[in-house]
């Protein structure tokens, strides 16, 4: 499995399992952050990694249990402005101790106009490393229903859209609305 395929599967798991987070519409941002980080921690542990919170100023890391090497860095941010100024640059900052690790960013809410700036930051700063972005998009935090899944790896990238939906009991779930759009031409 290539890095691109692995990160696509990671994004697919997030979207398809979102209902398992048991988040109601009255959840606070802290609830969303905690549940999403816990989802990825449990996923990493299910894959045989040790998951740790707040390592090297990253929200979550996966470590190889035998070597201790960092396999994945993850950041979760609810504020688009802070994501552009601090979170994404911190995530993309080169780490000599873990040069080949996966990078994952989950953004709780961004405006459609923020997407171009976010893409610019990621393309400029990821330094060729494999990266996945999951961003909830909408005109305001309460109306964010579109989910953008972006994956970058080597010279290729992929994009897929999903939507967040509220069920009759006011719980969130998500589903994809189309297939992955993949490009291997190097024009990120």
Image: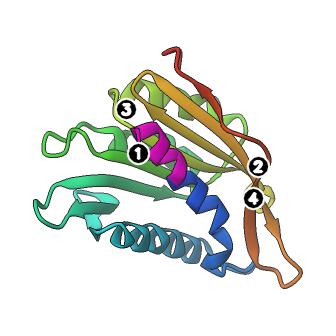
Find residue 175 and report its horizontal and vertical position in percent.
Answer: 75, 58
Question: What's drawn in magenta, residue-wise?
Answer: 1-9
On residue 117, the disc is none
Mark 2–mark 3 contact, CB under 8 Å? no
Q: Which residue is mark 1?
A: 86
Residues at marks 2 and 1, CA–CA distance in whole angstroms: 21 Å
Left or right of 47? Residue 10 is right
Of badges 2 and 1, nearer the viewer stands 2
Residues at marks 3 and 4, CA–CA distance in whole angstroms: 28 Å
Mark 1–mark 3 contact, CB under 8 Å? no
Label 3 CA crowd tier, 10 Å (few <14, some 14–19, many 20+): some
Find residue 43 and report its horizontal and vertical position in percent.
Answer: 43, 69
Label 4 CA crowd tier, 10 Å (few <14, some 14–19, many 20+): some
- The residue depicted at 76 percent of the width and 49 percent of the height is 138
- The residue depicted at 43 percent of the width and 42 percent of the height is 88
Left or right of 170? Residue 36 is left
Q: Which residue is mark 3?
A: 126
Q: Is residue 35 magenta?
A: no
- The residue depicted at 43 percent of the width and 21 percent of the height is 155
Of badges 2 and 4, nearer the viewer stands 4
Q: Mark 4 or mark 3, which is nearer the start of the sequence?
A: 3
Q: Which residue is mark 4?
A: 175
Task: Please tell me whether mark 3 sits on a helix, a strand or a loop.
Answer: loop
For the N terminus, the quadrant is top left
């Amino acid at each position: 499995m290539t890095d691109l395929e692995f990160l696509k599967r990671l994004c697919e798991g997030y979207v398809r399992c979102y209902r398992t987070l048991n988040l109601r519409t009255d959840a606070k941002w802290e609830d969303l952050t905690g549940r999403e980080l816990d989802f990825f921690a449990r996923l990493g542990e299910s894959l045989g990694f040790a998951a740790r919170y707040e390592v090297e100023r990253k929200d979550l890391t996966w470590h190889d249990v035998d070597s201790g090497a960092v396999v994945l860095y993850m950041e979760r941010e609810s504020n688009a402005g802070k994501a552009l100024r601090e979170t994404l640059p911190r995530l993309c900052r080169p780490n000599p101790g873990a040069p080949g690790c996966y990078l994952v960013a989950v953004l709780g809410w961004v405006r459609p106009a923020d997407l171009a700036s976010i893409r610019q930051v990621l393309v400029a700063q990821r330094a060729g490393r494999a990266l996945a972005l999951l961003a909830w998009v909408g005109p305001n935090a309460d109306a964010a229903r579109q989910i953008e899944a972006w994956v970058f790896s080597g010279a290729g990238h992929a994009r897929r859209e999903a939507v967040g939906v509220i069920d009759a009991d006011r719980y969130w779930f998500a589903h994809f609305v189309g297939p992955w759009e993949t490009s291997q031409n190097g024009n990120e």
